[in-house]
Every structure is written in C-alpha cells, then in structure tokens.
Image: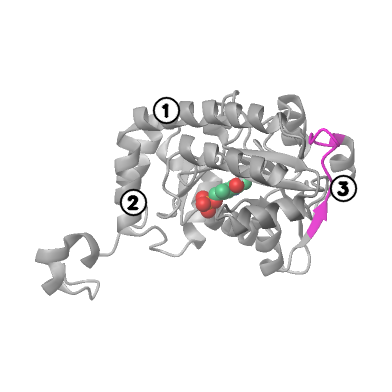
Amino acid sequence: MLDANENSLADENDEWFSRYPDPLQKNLKARISAIKGVPVESIFIGNGSDEAIDLLVRATCRPGMDSILICPPTYGMYEVAAQIQEASVREVALNNDFQLDVPAIKAAMDETTRLLFLCSPNNPTGNLLREEDVRALIECFPGLVVLDEAYIDFASSASWVGRLNQYPNLVILQTLSKAWGLAGARVGLAFADASIIAVLNRIKPPYNVSKPAQEAAFRALENCERVDEWVRTLIAGRELLAQSLREMSIVQQVFPSNANFLLVRFAGSGRIHQQLLQRGIVVRNRSNMLLCEDCLRITVGSRVQNEKLINTLKEINV
Ligand SMILES: *Cc1c(COP(=O)(O)O)cnc(C)c1O
C-alpha cells in the first residue's frame, strides 16, 4: 500500500488510524442495507445527517436564484445550510396543532423551490406529521422532499423507508446520533433513489466518514437488541416524566411526544431555565421559536436523571 502517502511505520501498532477509510463505506452500507431493507445504491452515509442536509442544498440550489421551503418551528440546520449556499428560505409555519399547512405550502412553492424539508417526529415539537399531508406534498412538490426521521426509532408509526421506491423525489434522513447512541461518532444516513445518492457521492468530500466512526457504527448496528431495549426504556421514561410534569403547577402544557424529548410550556420559562442551570441541569430554551412561547425542550434522560429533574423542579416550584 504505497499509493496514498500514509505512514506505513504506524501500521503495526495502529492499523485502525494509519490508513484512509473506505470512501464509500461498503461494509457499513451492507449492514444498513440488511437492517433497513434498502439497496446499497440507495444509501448515503455522511458526517452526521447535517452533512447530508448541506450536500442536498449544495446539489440542488443555485446561489441567489433557488430556495428551500421549511415549516417552523423546526430543526435549525436546514436554514443554516441554505444561508451558506445563498439560497433563500421560504417559511410556512406549522398550524397551532404543529401539523403542516398543506394549502399554504402549495401556494409557496414554485420551480425555484428545490427542497421541501419535513421533520417527523418534528424537533422541537416532538409530534409526527400526518401521513396524508406528507404524501400529498411528496406527490405535488416540484423538487425533492427531504423527510427528516432523526427520531423515528422513538415513534409509534413506521419509517417511510419502506415506501421509498414509490417516490423518486423523496429523500429520507436518519441518524445514529439519537436512538443508536453515537452522537460523538457523527454518522448520518440518507436514503433515496440511486440517481440522487449518486449525486451526493459525487460532491461529498472523499473521506467524509472517518474509520473510527465507521467501526463504531458497524459495531452499534451489530447490536440492534440493545437499541430496542434503550428505546423501550426511554419511551417509558418519557411517559413517566410527562406525567410527573403535568402534575406541577409551574407546568402549563406538556406536548405529546413521539421522540426522546418533551416540549414543555412553563409559567415563566426563562426563570425556570435559569434556575435549572444554577442547579446543574441543562435543558434547551425554545421560547424564542415560533409557537413555542415559554417552552423548554427537555431530553429524556436515565431514570436517575429524570428523577433529579423532577425533584429539582419541585424545589423551584415552591
Ligand atoms: C439531532 C438531529 C439530527 C441529527 O443530526 P446529526 O448530524 O446526524 O447528528 C438531524 N435532524 C434533526 C431534526 C435532529 O434533531
């Protein structure tokens, strides 16, 4: 192996790091293909799904000319990627029940809206989008519909991955950062028609997923039972946490969640956020986002962490 200017002296002790990784992650894709039932040619692996979002915007949007369409409140990276590409961002807010405003989305799209980002379960609201709305939009959108399923492992309904071959303009994003417990490894997945995946592979940095990341992902995917067990525990924890929160007088509303977090409306979220911080508990303040006034987003933790959160809130409550 004298073709890539690696350091062969490092081989013996550190084989793992001394050679460049497989640019197309063949071993990892074979495993993902078997688990998800998607052909290898329809799988892209990125340095987090954030990389897939960035590449999708760069592949489809001409700077200063094209746009993306998003439905706030939602994940922030869609807008960030569009701004970097100088694509404009059209926003059609979710309805008060955090569902899609299908007629308004249809009115806002044209030949220059290249991507429609839908997030289900949505971050930060936690709810699934209605299937018939998603289907209606996929069927009429002139560009690609990107369905972000980062939290699908925690949801009560199935992934759209099984319907991929019905929709040539559908891109599904998933990640190993949440249920799979690998946020630090940075491994994100995109599933789509082989022609779309081919474009992403052509414009990605050659070695976008490091060898340690590929190894960590491969090992995690060998152990699906462990993830199933985590998911069951986290969902049970979510429901317990929701119930305890609903009993507190400082809590105005706990929104139903299909994810591993809860969006919670407090009486005075700023004060609660501050007081939690002072007691060493970090939650995300989402009160500046549309429809999320006075809301904190709380990740479901371990049993001990959930109990500590509740006990701390009870202290603050008095
Ligand atoms: C956490 C999250 C991601 C994951 O991004 P990675 O880059 O894969 O860690 C993607 N989309 C949404 C909506 C998220 O909340």
Q: Is residue 174 left or right of residue 74?
A: left
Q: Position of residue 284 (x, y in %)?
A: 65, 52
Please report the residue visible at 53 percent of the width from the left and 57 percent of the height from the top.
51
- Principal secondary structure, stretch drawn in magenta: loop
Task: Look at mark 3 in the image and give the residue it sits on.
Answer: 108
The local secondary structure at tag 1 comes to helix
Extent of the magenta region: 89-102
Task: Look at mark 1 in the image and give the residue it sits on.
Answer: 228
Please report the residue visible at 47 percent of the width from the left and 38 percent of the height from the top.
304
Determine if the magenta segment contains residue 265.
no
Are there few (<14), some (14-19), or many (20+) residues within 10 Å of tag 2? many
Mark 3 or mark 2, earlier in chain: 3
Q: Nearer the viewer, mark 1 or mark 2?
A: 1
Is the residue under label 2 in contact with that under label 3 (CB below 8 Å)?
A: no
Question: Most extreme residue toward the front, as rendered?
Answer: 318
Task: Look at mark 2 in the image and give the residue it sits on.
Answer: 214
Q: Position of residue 187 (x, y in %)?
A: 44, 51
The local secondary structure at tag 2 comes to helix
Q: Position of residue 25 (x, y in %)?
A: 35, 50
Amino acid marked by disc 3: Ala
Visible residue check, residue 256 = yes
Residue 189 vertical placement versus 36 (above, below):
below
Mark 3 or mark 1, earlier in chain: 3
Amino acid marked by disc 1: Asp
The Cα–Cα distance between marks 3 and 1, rounded to whole angstroms, is 40 Å
Mark 1 or mark 2, earlier in chain: 2
Label 1 CB sits under 8 Å from any ligand 1 atom: no
Q: Which mark is on residue 27? A: none
Determine if the magenta segment contains residue 101.
yes
Please report the residue visible at 58 percent of the width from the left and 27 percent of the height from the top.
240
Q: Nearer the viewer, mark 3 or mark 1?
A: 1
